[in-house]
Image (spheres, coloured by chain):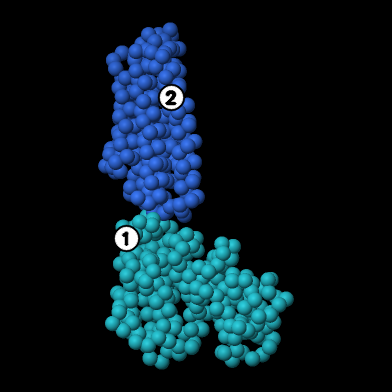
Chain colours: A cyan, B blue
Amino acid sequence: MLIPTVPETKPIKLSVRDMAFSYGQKKILDGLSMDIHAERVTAIIGPSGCGKSTFLKCFNRIHEVSTDVKVSGDMQIDGVDIYRGGIDVVDLRRRVGMVFQKPNPFPKSIYENVAFGPRLFGVQDRTTLDGIVEDALRKAALWEEVKDRLKESATGMSGGQQQRLCIARALAVNPEVLLMDEPCSALDPIATAKIEDLIGELKESLTIVIVTHNMQQAARVSDYTAFFWLGKLVEMDLTERIFTTPRVQMTEDYITGRFG
Amino acid sequence: MRQFDTELKELREGIMAMAGVAEEMIELTIQALAEPSPAKAEQVNHLDRRMDEWELRLDQQCIDLLALRNPAASDLRRIASSLKIIPELERIGDHCCNIARRVGMVHPPILAGNDLERLGTETRGMVRRAVDAFVSNDAALAHAVILSDDSVDALYGKIYRDLLRIMLADPLCIERASHLILVIKNWERIADEATNIAEEVLFILEGHSAKHPYLHGDSVE
């Protein structure tokens, strides 16, 4: 495995060492080691089935909804193993939020979508909730578009708005890490540009890991890019290096479309 | 072959064709100077139009590839460097025209020996090898081109000093010597352009700039 050679000023937020993942007998990820820095965007690229999304899900343990899954090795957030006994998984998922490929708002009002998480964590006071909802919607660059129709159903919004609502919903519980699994693959270019701009703003206070099939998106939004192949990390480096002078031929072949 | 690979191949072949015209212009310029031949000088001028046409066409091809193909890694380096190699070739053509224009003004010869001819042939060799390095992806050859620039510079300096001495000794030679100074300056510039092309070849092949080696290792920030 090749790791970046450039000094980094931001601390390590997520650290992975010799991590492996299998579904039953099938090994999905193997021998993965990497560091993900705080307040940086790290993009994971690689062909379908290389384990990118699985890797992402391991950071907040939402793969645990599946049975017959085995994770080994070490995954840490701020130096604490997220798989050790005694970890509060609900709190882990608050700290490590996730946005999926297709926008998945709850069939509730715009307001209730965003207020859902804070309520779950015990915020009852209406004024406090109002403040959290507005703040999250502002951070998700959605406030101006929806402030006059917060009571309307979220399912009536456009796809791009729904996706930003899902980001607002994740932000409402004040996460430290945001995992994004192909967040723009169902969106048009304008909605995509809005999400990409948003990623640039959010990284000032969050650690973002994004899985994307769109190589140009990885190039546009990320500071680091990691290339996965068959469940292994082939190369990780500063994004501009990966896209101008990758060190591994396989990475070069993949990003220039000559793979396989 | 993928469509993109076909387009990259077309760009490469276009640059080879443009370089072919540049080499033809250099050859004609050497002959026009030596014989002297105003007809060959005129041919040089005529070929310059083809260089200009190639420049516009290849520039557009590069821009199209950047816009439509989102190239990355070595593809990106090749296209970005092509955008720099193309104007170098075009300027080689311009310098040949500058020399060819003076063919009638530098005779009868005032320089003893064959230094002037050597300057032309050494420069021609550098351009040829730089183009060969581009065509055959030969980093060692590109390095050699860069090194050989010193020898052309030294020869330029020698002829320049000879011309100064000739002018001091015989004011009747001043006009021809002045034109010759411009001639050798143009050859020297062509050698620089060959060096620049070789540096671009190294960027394509090795992924880092070969320019300004004295800055390497220093942080830009």
* Spatial CA span between label 1 and label 2: 44 Å
Near-viewer residue (A50 or A56): A50
Tell me the subunit letter for badge 1. Answer: A
Residue density around tag 1, few if under 14, some if 14–19, many if 20 or more, within 10 Å: few
Compared to A140, does A255 lie above or below? above
Mark number for residue A260?
Answer: 1
Q: Which residue is mark 2?
A: B47
Which amino acid type corresponds to the residue marked 2 in the rendered image?
Leu
Tell me the subunit letter for badge 2. Answer: B
Mark number for residue A24?
Answer: none
Which amino acid type corresponds to the residue marked 1 in the rendered image?
Gly
| SS category of the residue bearing label 1 | loop
Q: Is residue B53 left or right of residue B115?
A: right
In the image, farthest residue toward the right: A148
Q: Is residue B91 visible?
A: no
Q: Nearer the viewer, mark 1 or mark 2?
A: 1
Q: Position of residue B144 (x, y in %)?
A: 28, 37
Residue found at x 36% / y 21%: B28
Compared to A83, does B18 lie above or below? above
Residue found at x 37% / y 38%: B13
Near-viewer residue (B186 or B8): B8
Residue found at x 40% / y 80%: A58
Residue found at x 59% / y 71%: A159
Numbered circles on residues, count? 2
Residue density around tag 2, few if under 14, some if 14–19, many if 20 or more, within 10 Å: some
In which image quadrant can residue B17 be found? top left
In the image, farthest residue toward the left: B140
Compared to B122, does B220 lie above or below? below
Near-viewer residue (B43 or B217): B43
Mark 1 and mark 2 in contact? Answer it, CB < 8 Å: no
Q: Is residue B67 visible?
A: yes
